[in-house]
Image: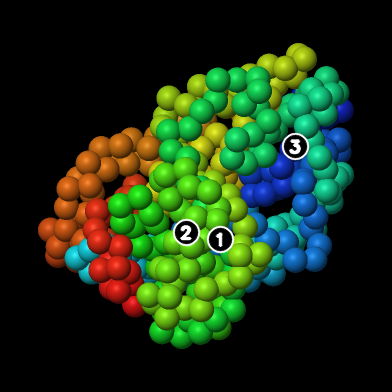
Amino acid sequence: MFEIATAKGYGMRISIVGGGFAGLAAAQVAEEVTSDVQLYDKGAYSGDRRGAWGEMVWDYSKLPLDRHVPGYVREANTGIFVGSNGKTTVTVPDGVILNRGELEKHWAGTLERTEIVENADVDEAEFRRLSSESDLLIDATGQFPISRRFTSLSYDVACPTLSGRIEADFSHLYPEPRALAYENYFLWIVPQSPEEATVGLGCREDKPPAELYEDMRQLLAEIDIEPPERESLYGGTDVSNGLRSLSHCSYELNDCTVHIAGDAIGLANSLTGFGMIHAAQSGRAAVRSFLQGESYKRRLLCQNFWTKAVTGVASPIHHTIGLDGIAQLAKSDIEYQEAFEPQQPADILGAVRTFI
């Protein structure tokens, strides 16, 4: 429990739209101080909960969850990034492979004082209504959120993606998660077991899903992976913003304070897509800053300054010599600190053949 003026939380209504990592983390903090918490999710916390996401986090200790709960699959302290010059092993502090859907279902089940509204279709009119009835409204609706109708929020990077968890023979890739960056594409494979993995492909161009799917089929065939059926994949968008975008993370609507959290504000690292830890941290900060009378913008700036600032400085170096070149200069494996964005302009097939 964190120290706050409990009188401020008493009788307060906190509404949260979006039930992913940011929304669940916000609800977890909110119900510590008030019993009037509502969480609206477009899906359900039952059945086969899946989406367009990767399923690896670095530094699991930063999540407000116990270890080895449902959805915690295994540890993964190393990953492999691939460029035209070969493979680079990256060490990740306290990396964990997740079954994100199962983890979110478990997390929602731990909320004891939150009213969860599943299969909720919150449109602009409903969002306005919630603001008129709430003291704090959290917009955790993911990429291109409802708040775009009320603010000047935009993204520096917006990459369409296709991803899904598929069953195939991943024994030649297991156990390390792998990411391949080249030209306008990035491919990731996160093995949950030798027989199952989360697979995704993103593109820095605005490609339609059908075209992106054909690219995925070609790339997976190059590494002897049976391509999944199109119907088993989920379309999404990886978004990222610089520090200046945080000025849009808070605003007033109908005398209600609105805080934008998670992917909605573009907190993920630009091309690696690592955003789940940032999402959870921002959800907690969205509630805590309000209850403690502090600036939410300042909190997000402090939490994300190192990531965003170093990424901005390091990106030109990566464009020039790549992650492989930096590893050779260091003469050792790289420790990933949420700042590096591997990118190598290279021939697609030549790069993919080094993936295994």
Q: Do the numbered discs 1 and 3 sit on residues whose CB atoms are within 8 Å? A: no
- Pick the front one: 344 or 10: 344
**10 Å crowding of disc 1: few (<14), some (14-19), many (20+):** many
User: Where does the image place residue 147, in percent across and percent down from the top left?
Assistant: 65, 27
Asked if residue 23 is positioned above or below residue 242 in the image, the reply reads: below
Marks 1 & 2, CB-CB < 8 Å contact: yes
Q: Is residue 215 left or right of residue 333?
A: right
Q: Residue at x 66, y 23 (%)?
A: 149
Q: Secondary structure at mark 2?
A: strand
CA–CA distance between discs 1 and 3? 26 Å
User: Looking at the image, can residue 32 be seen?
Assistant: no
Quadrant housing the N terminus = top right
Pair 2/3: label in front:
2
Q: To which residue does mark 2 refer?
A: 201
Residue 115, placed above or below residue 219: above
Picture disc at residue 163: 1
Residue 321 drawn at (x, y percent) = 17, 52
Instruction: Tell me the quarter of the picture where residue 291 sits.
Output: top right
Q: Nearer the viewer, mark 1 or mark 3?
A: 1
Please name whichever residue, 286 or 317, is drawn nearer the observer in this view of the structure: 317
**Left or right placement of residue 45 versus residue 189 in this view:** right
| Residue pointed to by mark 3 | 16
Helix, strand, or loop for circle 3? strand
Residue at 55 percent of width and 53 percent of height: 209
User: Residue flagged by tag 1: what amino acid is it?
Assistant: Ser
Q: Amino acid at mark 2?
A: Leu
